[in-house]
Image (cartoon, grey):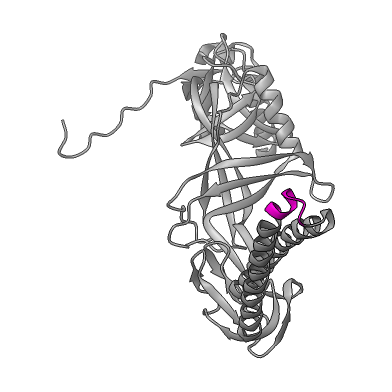
Amino acid sequence: MRFKQLVVLSAAVVVAACSPSNGREKGAGHGPGGGMPASEVTVMTAATEALPVSWEYVGQTAGSREVEVRARVTGILMSRNFKEGERVKKGQSLFTIDPKPFEAALARAVADLAAVEARLEQARRNAARLKPLYAEKAVSQKENDDAVSAEAIGAADVQAAQARLTEAKLNMAYTKVEAPVSGITTRALPSEGTLISGPGVLLTSVVQVDPIWVNFGIPDNEQARIQKAVQAGTLKLPRAFEVELRLPDGSVYAHKGKLDFSDVRVSLQTGTREARAELPNPSGELGPGQFVRVIVKGAMLPNAVTVPQRSVMEGPQGKFVYVVDEKSTAQARPVEAGQWAGDRWIITSGLKGGERVIVDGVMKIGPGAPVKVAEPKAEKPVLGKK
């Protein structure tokens, strides 16, 4: 008997639930969401504004000049006049080669010059003495010609002796090997007492680190996107790019520089185009070979569309946002997001300025769901301010 009562009660519940007047009596809505009540959301209009844009790459520092120091003469290395790894100035003495053989050669060149100058004077006196005699036919043509030739030969000998003297002076000066540029020295390769066979032996190198260079590569596909955006008018490039460095510890380098070289060739190994920045380095904080982050600034997006970061979601097909259409329903819109601008995404495609984008309440809705736009929440007043 009890079982029959339960069956009758269940049938009554099913009939009541299936009655078409059941929903109307309770005032249930029938909207675009198939009867779903409108969810309350907060929207924000996609803004269009001019924004700066930058690119970041991995770079490596290098000396702006790296000069090999070599001796110009052959001799015994007597002394090293600097401390390895220290700063040196242009013209500072780095090495000394035994000067004694060159002092002797210089003295010999001086004596040779004096001898040929004396012979020249003698030849000139002879030519001057024979000149009036030849005019009076007191000497032969041959004697006069010999005197003139001897004077010319003596003058040539003096010039040759002067050249040898200049060479001897240069060789004497080259016994002091000086820094060709200001910079930091590397390790000294030969030790004192070594026979230096002229320019064939590398003594050390001097690296100029002020200014310092930073080499980095720009991916070819990114370069193509930049050129395409410039041609489309959505990106404006400056005449000169400003460069900023982020150091390995996350800090920003105090001095800014400029981009001074960009290669047109693409590397077959890396698929990038070589670029170089130049920055001041007065205190020597940066050394050659350091890895840094290179931030290239100066470009502008004249009509950038931006939305709050929290409004952009990730789906199986990529990033998307919800926009509110004229029927007050939420529509999923695939977008391509570029860089961040503060707390906002820069939308490169898929969204136009002025469209209403759902910012809060996105977890309660789906595509085509009815929404009710709520007023933005007023910010809480800060204590002490009216």
Residue occupying the point 61% across, 57% down: 65
In the image, residue 96 above or below residue 24:
below
Position above or below: 239 against 85? above
Count of marks overlaid on the render: 0
- Quadrant containing the C terminus is top left
Up-down relation of residue 327 to residue 191 (above or below): above
Residue at the far bottom in the pictured view: 193
Which residue is at a point 46% across and 53% down the rendered structure image? Answer: 253
Seen from the viewer's position, the closer of residues 186 and 166 is: 166
Q: Is residue 105 above or below residue 149?
A: below
Residue 111 quadrant? bottom right
On the image, the x and y values in percent for residue 186 come to 60, 73
Instruction: Say whether residue 342 is left or right of residue 167.
Output: left
Query: Residue at horizontal 42%, vertical 21%?
Result: 374
The residue at the far top in this view is 326
Q: Position of residue 363 (x, y in %)?
A: 56, 34
Could one spot residue 59 in this view of the protein? yes
**Is 236 or 37 nearer to us in this picture?**
236
Observer-nearest residue: 226 or 148? 148
Residue 135 drawn in magenta: yes
- Which quadrant would the N terminus be assigned to in this image? top right
Q: Is residue 364 visible?
A: no
Q: Is residue 216 magenta?
A: no
In this rendered view, identify the residue nearer to me: 42 or 79.
Answer: 79
Q: Which residues are magenta?
A: 131-138
- State the image coordinates of residue 268 (x, y, percent, origin top left): 84, 47
Q: Position of residue 291 (x, y in %)?
A: 61, 59
Q: Please tell me whether the stretch drawn in magenta is mainly helix, strand or loop.
A: helix
